[in-house]
Every structure is written in C-alpha cells, then in structure tokens.
Image (tube, rainbow, N blue to C red):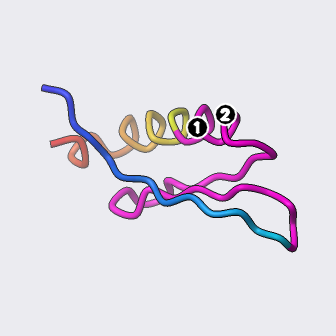
C-alpha cells in the first residue's frame, strides 16, 4: 500500500531558498534554489528517513 505524506513549502526571502518540511516525519526537511530541486530533495530525504524509521511508513 502506498502512503501519502504532506509537505509544507515556503520561500525564504533572506536566504533566497525554498524550504520544505514533512511535519510528521522527524528529520524530513530540506532546502533548494528552485521548486523542482526541492521536490527531488524532499523525496530523497523522505526515503532516507523511512529507511531509518520504517515504522513511520505504517
């Protein structure tokens, strides 16, 4: 079964970077210069977090 996660994204005017966080997954946060890169980074960090804590996926 595939699980869906919600991510929150915002643009930081100070750093000029997009910031993303998946609130229910400890450690799932990242930043990037554009939204495409942010999406890839969030996917990667989510996969790593789920490998470290497989109980989150259930």
C-alpha span from label 2 to label 1: 5 Å
Q: Which residue is mark 1?
A: 39
Q: Which residue is mark 2?
A: 36
State the image quarter where residue 38 is shown.
top right
- On-image quarter of the N terminus: top left
Taking the magenta stretch, the answer to whether it contains residue 16 is yes
Callouts 2 and 1 close, C-beta under 8 Å: yes
User: Farthest residue toward the top?
Assistant: 1
**Dot 2 lies on which element?**
helix
36 relative to 15 in the view: left or right? left
Who is closer to the viewer here, 41 or 49? 41
Q: Identify the residue at horizontal 50%, vertical 34% (top origin).
A: 43
Where residue 10 sits: x, y (%)?
63, 63
User: Bounds of the magenta span?
Assistant: 14-42
Where residue 34 sits: x, y (%)?
76, 42
Q: Residues within 10 Å of mark 2 (few under 14, many from 20)?
A: few
């Amino acid at each position: 079964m595939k699980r869906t996660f919600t991510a929150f994204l915002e643009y930081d005017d100070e750093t000029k970077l997009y910031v993303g966080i998946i609130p229910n997954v400890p450690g799932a946060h990242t930043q990037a210069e554009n939204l495409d890169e942010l999406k890839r980074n969030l996917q990667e960090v989510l996969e790593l977090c789920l490998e470290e804590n497989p109980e989150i996926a259930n």
